[in-house]
Image (cartoon, helix red, strand yellow):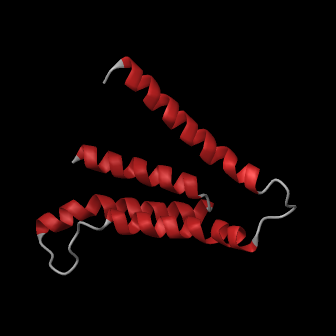
Amino acid sequence: MSNVQTILLIAVLALSVIITRFLPFAVFRKTDSLPASITYLGKVLPAAMMGLLVVYCFKDYSFTSWSLTDVSSVLPAAIASAVVIAVHLMKRNTILSIFVGTAVYMLIVNMM
């Protein structure tokens, strides 16, 4: 990739980030409150994204046939998921739960 291509790529990426950050402020600047549909999405999307992450985490595991190798491969993800659930129930902080669960998973995987 040449220098010109690199500069153009960075410019396009920067412009796309700026547009996605400032577009909501431009669209909703004249309203006192957000539309009901946007408020609804703000309430349901975090839980939907967590569900999506759980499905993605366990997508490669077969839960119908178990063997010793399957248990050892799913064990780090299962332990990290249990830690995420426990931390979230104790602290009610989504970001903290995700970070702690990720750290536990990475520790387990790197220690095995």
**Residue at horizontal 57%, vertical 58%?**
94
Nearest the eye: 84 or 16: 16
Q: Residue most toward the bottom?
A: 64
Q: Quarter of the image holding residue 18?
A: top right
Picture layout, residue 25 above or below residue 51: above
Q: Residue most toward the right?
A: 32
Picture layout, residue 44 above or below residue 103: below
Q: Residue most toward the top?
A: 3
Q: Is residue 82 left or right of residue 37?
A: left
**Residue at horizontal 23%, vertical 66%?**
60
Q: Is residue 96 left or right of residue 109?
A: right
Nearest the eye: 40 or 50: 40
Q: Report the label total.
A: 0
Q: Residue 84 at x, y = what percent? A: 47, 61
Nearest the eye: 17 or 76: 17
Q: Residue 36 at x, y = what percent? A: 74, 73
**Residue at horizontal 15%, vertical 75%?**
66
Tell me the quadrant of the picture where the N terminus can be found: top left
Q: Quarter of the image holding residue 21?
A: top right
**Residue at horizontal 38%, vertical 59%?**
80
Q: Residue 24 at x, y = what percent? A: 70, 53
